[in-house]
Each structure stands twice: as C-alpha cells, then as structure tokens.
Image: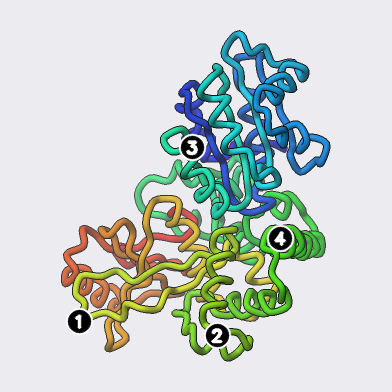
Amino acid sequence: MLIERELYSRIMPFQDSPEAIVVTGMRRVGKTTLLLHILRNLKSQNKIFLDLENPLNQRYLEDPNYERILDTFKFLGLDTRKRGYVFLDEIQFVKSIPSAVKYLTDHYEIKFILSGSSSFYIKNLFSESLSGRKYIFELYPFSFGEFLSARKPVLNTKNLEGRVTPAIFEELDRHYHEYLLYGGFPGVVLKDPVEEKKMMLQDIFSSYFQLEVKQLGDFRKTTVIRDLMLLLMERVGSRLDIQKLSKEIGVSRETVYNYLAFLENTYFITLIRPFSRSRDSEIRSMPKVYVCDTGLVNQFARIGEGALFENAVFSALRANGEVNYYQKKSGVEIDFILNKRHAYEVKLKPYDQDLMRLSRLAEELKLQDYTIVSRKYTELPHTTYGFIL
C-alpha cells in the first residue's frame, strides 16, 4: 500500500532544476519508497535506479574515473545525450559519491535524486563538493495525517474546520492513541497485530544499531552507546546534564558529546536548545532530548503518558521549522517555541491557570501567539490537539 508522503509535494517543484535532490532520514522511514514514487511519476523514461546497499552496485560508483561511471550509466540504459535522471539509494555506502555527482552534474545533463541515512555524512561531505548544487530534504516517520491515510483513509484532519466536537475528538483520539503507542514507522503502521508491531519495532532498533552504530559509527565501545540510547529514551522531554550522563555510563564528557552528535546526525534523537531573549532570565546551557519515534520510546522505555505525548507533539512541530524551549531559573517554562514566534504548552488536561500562565509568558517574551496542546478534550480557548498540529 503506497502512502504519498507529505514531503513529496515539497520535492516535486525541484524535479527539473539542475541541483541534486538529497532525501535523508533515519533507516526504515520510507526513503526508498519515496524515491521509487518519484521515479514512477517522472514523465521522462530516461532514468535509472541503483540501490547502493547492494555491494555490486557500489562498485559502479567507486571507479575513480568518472567518465567510466558515465559509461556504466549508459550500459544500464541512460541516454547521456539528453536530460537523464539517476536515482541512488543509500549513498552513505560509497564515500566518493559527492565528487562523482559534482563532476557528472557539471559536465552532463544528469539530474541526481539521492537518499542516505546519515545527515552528518551528507551535510559535511556534500557541503564542500556540492555547495550550491543540492537541495536537502529530511524524511521522518509518518505524521499523524500520513498514519490516518494508511489506517483510515476516509478520515482527514485537514478537513476539520472550526471547533473540534466531542464526537470528532473521540473518533480521532482512538487512532491517535495507537499512533502514540506504536509510532509512525511505515512498517509498523501497516502491521495489524500488536505483537507484530512490537516485533517490527525491535527489528528497527536492531537494524539501526547494527548498521548505523556498529557499521557507520565504528565505535570501540558499542555497549556504552547502547546504554546511552536507553538512558535517553527514559529522559524524553528532559534537560540533559552531560556531567551526570558521563558518570552513569562511565565515559568522559567529550565522549558523551560525540555520542550525542552521532545519534542526532543519524536521526535517532533531536536536541533542542533554549529560546533566548535575556541572558539573565533563562537556563541556557542544557538541551532537551526527544526521540525520533514514540513507538521506539514506548517499546524500550518506561515513561509516563505526558512525556510520550510531548515527544509526539515535538515530532509534529519539527516539520514546521525551528523548535526551542524556554525555562526561567525559577522553573517556569514553555515546552516549545516554534520559529521564535509561537508558544506551545503540552498538557494531558489543561486548566484555566495553565492558559493564563502561558499567556503571560508569551506576552513577556513578545511572541506572536500561544497555544495549549491538550491530550484530553477541552473547551478552553487557545487550545488544539496533537492530531491536528
């Protein structure tokens, strides 16, 4: 069952530009399926697809003579005398790809559409060799809207206008509950039995650990980074004390920073930084941590419904721009500030005093707007729900 990803409509305006299109994101989020969907919908028949997880295909791109790579493309059916499209999946397996793509883009009418699972590799290696010659798009697990398209295609939160009624809330909430517990990885969403969903989540975690941590990361102490991953899932929505983490897992602070950078750049976690207006009024040093998918958190950690819901709200907001948090030294906080303009406070069940406090803070910070995101049904103004973000 093909679910057209929301990212597809953002990519397609660039399909005829000369720049390479790079789709990056964690393993098993659907990058290959998205590339194949783009491939099938291209009107041109002058196109080829190579999966670089296949060692035989890797050899095609490892030739130091880029003209011979071009000859390989011709052998595979690409007519290089006119505009052609080359799709390369899992590019992190061939380190020389950026320079080869640059050469072939500069000298021939070849449009590259690429995918890879490590933003560290893509953003760093590609930044030099493909500066000004690429557009990077990040793909995440299914949003709740995409989840509904897969599970209940007749339902569509985009059609909601005005106030959400109790009946609408009850219908959507049943599906949102499943989304919170098992997340948005396409392979998990498309499974029906709960045990199969859990087995798939186990497999996703194992695949990430074996192929990203052990193979791509090349760490000497993989058990330590494994323990860190489990600790981070237990601390979703919390500020990270690096010194405390280093003591718990028995490595230096520098090593913890390196591990966190790797986990973030391979999309397992996201660290968000404090919003700053005044240096004196905020705690500025500690980032808060969120995990790529609530299904993984629910499978491998024991956290409360509030933290799980907060992680889901963050996942919905990150697709819309920069996300920060705000906290005064007194402890008063705003869970999320989007694009430095809009405040979001996450509550299982909000009360009048929550709305008043958020209103005062938003005014104090000169934010344009504020919203409470509620897990339960509420009649309070300035509120919304996770399933319509």
| Measured Cα–Cα span from mark 2 to mark 3 | 37 Å
Q: Are marks 4 and 1 in contact (CB under 8 Å)?
A: no
The disc placed on residue 245 is: 2
Q: Where in the figure is residue 54, as x and y percent of width and height?
A: 80, 40
- Pick whichever of labels 2 and 3 is earlier in the sequence: 3
Identify the mark nearer the N-term, 4 or 1.
4
Task: Read off the residue under disc 4.
Answer: 208
Q: Mark 4: which amino acid?
A: Tyr
Q: Give the residue at mark 3.
A: 130
Tell which circle, 2 or 4, labels the residue nearer the N-terminal end: 4
Name the amino acid, label 2.
Leu
Q: Is residue 232 above or below residue 53?
A: below
Image quarter of the N terminus? top right
- Which one is in front, 328 or 190? 328
Residue 196, horizontal then vertical, whole percent: 81, 60
The residue that disc 1 covers is 280
- Name which of mark 1 and mark 2 comes first in the sequence: 2
Checking the image for residue 228, the label placed there is: none
Report the number of discs. 4
